[in-house]
């Protein structure tokens, strides 16, 4: 039905009530075609009823079916509302407003309190308070009394006249640093609210930037709201609603830009490799994913010989097909800086694991050269039965399931989609640097996600992939541990 409704020339926005889809891949394909031309909003119910299926990896354990829907909606540019009221707030804006050129918003108000509320709501929705140009602030100072605030939010005071509203809005729309305006109109004590609305309407209708109006004054602003609505200008009761609608306008603009990109392809140097013919490390390396060299030792003496070859210090990990979370069982030793430490470490790792899990098959240990310091993240893939390969990114290490700082995206990924996925987590934002933590190479991490998504696409027999941790370095990134599972 989506293409049929989208073909209607009188339809500007499509809203969906969605309980589920029968063919996830077909749904994404059709929805992507539609959203190139018209925005689609969805109210997807059953958010908390899906549960999470059991899985061996962190990635599989954290990927419930609702996460798959979220990833599918993100992929096809469909915006998911939390409730019916929000969906229609968004639809109003998308149907009537031009799209913003960015996320910088200015608030124009005749009362300080609602202006601060609007500023909070804008930032909560991922938007930014625009920094006004000196020329704009100077123009506002000439239009307003000395007690008014000419900084963002612009508070004209309760005495603001309809002409001051119009002149201030005109000045703000002319500022190149302003992408959108959130207009607040409380009942003016000296004028009728509809007079202010009538003065504002010509400027709003002529603007190439979106202007949304919040009218919190109940009965005394009803007539003003009717004037705005007759002019096709979206109105809301509270600033928080308008801020949410501005957010979806910004997301729509960003999606249309991003949708023009396609996923880059990496030419693998061994295109016929599978898990039956190589190790997970070799398969990842074939797709250009950097992997720290790892070698297997079946005895303490062999471990020492390998450590000498790799160079000290080294990391030692238990080698067992039955153990996913090695560190939980004492199966990982770090910073082994001498032959003696490696020799006795071998026995210690084996003993730790045998004591904790006697039935586990043990094939010795794996050794790696200790990697340089950096930030540790997790990247992974699990296959959703409806939508296909779900890529995961988030905080890595042993606490990933406890922190649940993860996000999912539907493959295959473009570089921009990978970077967007990373920004949705604290782990991704932290790559810019935090306190004493130096910045890491975000581009290299995003490239690992892109290549992992290609690997998953070209090897449908793989059901799960998990790199935990991937260490993001000042330049580059390196896989320290990887596991894969097949059907």
Image (tube, helix red, strand yellow):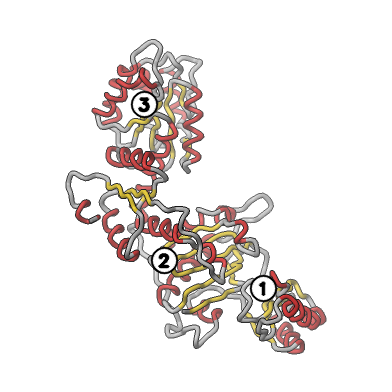
**273 shown above or below 393:** below
Q: Nearer the viewer, residue 216 or 123?
A: 216
Q: CA distance from mark 3 to mark 2?
A: 43 Å
**Front position among marks 3 and 2:** 2
Residue 55 pos. (x, y %)? 54, 70
Splitting the image into 4 quarters, where does residue 135 fall? Answer: top left
Q: Please give the label number shown on residue 326.
A: 1
Residue 265 pos. (x, y %)? 40, 71
**Front position among marks 2 and 1:** 1
| Lower position in the chain sequence, tag 3 or tag 1 | 3
* Residue at the top extreme, as displayed: 190
Splitting the image into 4 quarters, where does residue 65 fall? Answer: bottom left
**457 shown above or below 45:** below
**264 shown above or below 118:** below
Secondary structure under tag 1 reads helix
* Residue found at x 48% / y 69%: 382
| Lower position in the chain sequence, tag 2 or tag 1 | 1
Secondary structure under tag 2 reads loop
- Disc 2 packing (10 Å; few <14; some 14–19; many ≥20): many
* Residue found at x 36% / y 52%: 255
Image quadrant containing the N terminus:
bottom left
Residue at the disc numbered 3 = 169
**Front position among marks 3 and 1:** 1
Evaluate if marks 3 and 1 touch, with contact meaning CB atoms under 8 Å apart. no
Q: Nearer the viewer, residue 234 or 149?
A: 234
Q: CA distance from mark 2 to mark 1?
A: 28 Å
* Residue found at x 26% / y 31%: 205
Q: Please give the label number shown on residue 411.
A: 2
* Count of marks, rendered view: 3
- Disc 1 packing (10 Å; few <14; some 14–19; many ≥20): some
| Lower position in the chain sequence, tag 3 or tag 2 | 3
């Amino acid at each position: 039905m989506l293409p049929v409704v989208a073909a209607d020339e009188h339809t500007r926005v499509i809203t969906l009530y969605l309980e589920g889809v029968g063919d996830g891949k077909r749904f994404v394909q059709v929805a992507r075609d539609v959203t190139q031309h018209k925005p689609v909003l969805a109210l997807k119910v059953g958010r908390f009823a899906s549960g999470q299926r059991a899985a061996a990896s962190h990635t599989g354990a954290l990927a419930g079916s609702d996460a798959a829907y979220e990833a599918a909606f993100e992929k096809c540019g469909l915006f998911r509302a939390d409730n019916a009221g929000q969906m229609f707030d968004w639809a109003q804006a998308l149907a009537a407003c031009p799209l913003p050129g960015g996320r910088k918003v200015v608030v124009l108000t005749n009362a300080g309190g609602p202006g601060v509320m609007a500023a909070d709501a804008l930032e909560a929705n991922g938007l930014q308070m625009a920094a006004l140009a000196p020329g704009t602030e100077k123009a506002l100072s000439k239009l307003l009394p000395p007690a008014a605030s000419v900084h963002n939010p612009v508070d004209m005071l309760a005495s603001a006249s309809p002409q001051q509203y119009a002149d201030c809005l005109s000045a703000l729309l002319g500022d190149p640093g302003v992408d959108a305006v959130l207009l607040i109109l409380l009942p003016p004590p000296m004028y009728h609210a509809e007079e202010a609305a009538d003065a504002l309407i010509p400027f709003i209708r002529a603007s190439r930037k979106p202007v949304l109006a919040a009218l919190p004054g109940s009965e005394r602003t009803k007539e003003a709201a009717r004037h705005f609505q007759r002019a096709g200008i979206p109105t809301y009761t509270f600033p928080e609603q308008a801020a949410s609608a501005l957010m979806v306008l910004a997301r729509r603009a960003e999606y249309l830009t991003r949708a023009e990109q396609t996923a880059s392809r990496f030419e693998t140097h061994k295109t016929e490799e599978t898990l039956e013919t190589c190790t997970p490390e070799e398969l990842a390396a074939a797709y250009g994913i950097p992997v720290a060299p790892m070698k297997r030792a079946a005895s303490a003496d062999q471990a020492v010989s390998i450590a000498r070859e790799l160079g000290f210090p080294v990391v030692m990990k238990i080698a067992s097909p039955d153990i996913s979370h090695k560190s939980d069982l004492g199966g990982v030793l770090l910073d082994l800086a001498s032959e003696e430490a490696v020799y006795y470490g071998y026995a210690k790792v084996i003993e730790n694991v045998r004591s904790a899990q006697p039935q586990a098959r043990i094939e010795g240990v794996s050794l790696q050269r200790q990697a340089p310091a950096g930030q540790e993240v997790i990247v992974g893939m699990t296959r959703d039965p409806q939508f296909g390969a779900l890529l995961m990114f988030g905080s890595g290490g042993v606490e990933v399931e406890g922190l649940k700082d993860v996000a999912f995206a539907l493959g295959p990924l473009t570089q921009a989609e990978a970077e967007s996925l990373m920004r949705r987590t604290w782990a991704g934002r932290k790559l810019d640097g935090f306190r004493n933590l130096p910045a890491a190479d975000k581009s290299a991490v995003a490239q690992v996600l892109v290549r992992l998504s290609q690997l998953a696409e070209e090897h449908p027999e793989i059901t799960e992939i998990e790199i935990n941790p991937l260490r993001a370095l000042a330049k580059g990134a390196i896989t320290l541990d990887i596991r894969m599972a097949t059907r």
